[in-house]
Structure formats: C-alpha cells, structure tokens
Amino acid sequence: MSAEPLKTLFHPFEAEAVSLPRKGERVLFLGAEPGFRLPEGFDAALHLVQGFRPHFRALQGAGFAV
C-alpha cells in the first residue's frame, strides 16, 4: 500500500470525523505494509493481516501482532 491509500485510510481519524480508538479496543488492519504511521493518540491494539511474507516478517520484526 502506497502512502496515498494510507493517508485516505487514516484521514477520518486525523480530521476528527471519527473518534480515535482508545486503549483496550482492538483494530484489524488488512493489507498492512511496513512503515505506516498511526495518527497521534491512536492507542488501540492493532492486529495486522499481511499475506506477503516479506511484509509480514518486517511488520512482525517491528513488534506488531501479525
């Protein structure tokens, strides 16, 4: 996923159109790629899904639950 789709994905949170998930809540992120940036204040537990092995390993190595 390039930077543009990620901007679109997180735009509602950054524009405060949708409230940020809080600590203790869970969020499923399908097709996550390494290097994404979460909006400030995004405290929910992320569960990432990535079928492309190199991205999977990079995300796992960065400490995410994949």
Image (cartoon, rainbow, N blue to C red):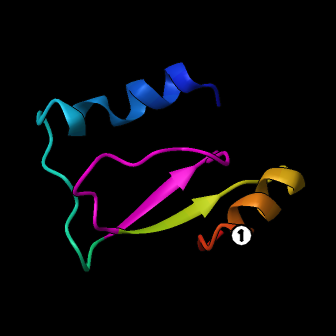
Residue lying at 31% horizontally and 68% vertically, measured from the top left: 44
Queried whether the magenta region covers residue 37, the answer comes back as yes
For the stretch drawn in magenta, what is the main secondary structure?
Answer: loop
User: Where is residue 32 drawn, in percent x and y?
Assistant: 61, 48
User: Where is residue 42 drawn, in percent x and y?
Assistant: 28, 58
Residue lying at 19% horizontally and 67% vertically, measured from the top left: 22
Identify whether 26 is placed above or below 49: below
Q: Give the range drawn in magenta.
A: 26-44
Label 1, secondary structure: give it. Answer: helix
Identify whether 54 is placed above or below 47: above
Identify whether 17 is placed above or below 28: above
* Residue underneath mark 1: 60
Picture quarter with the N terminus: top right
Picture quarter with the C terminus: bottom right
Residue lying at 81% horizontally and 64% vertically, measured from the top left: 57
Residue lying at 54% horizontally and 44% vertically, measured from the top left: 36
Count residues near mark 1 (Cα–Cα under 10 Å), then give few for <14, some for 14-19, many for 20+: some
Queried whether the magenta region covers residue 17, the answer comes back as no
User: Where is residue 19 drawn, in percent x and y?
Assistant: 12, 49
Residue that protrudes farthest toward the right in the picture:
53
Mark count: 1
Residue that protrudes farthest toward the bottom in the picture:
24
Residue that protrudes farthest toward the top in the picture:
4
Is 50 situated left or right of 20 in this image? right
- Identify which amino acid the numbered label 1 is placed on: Gln
User: Where is residue 37 drawn, in percent x and y?
Assistant: 46, 45
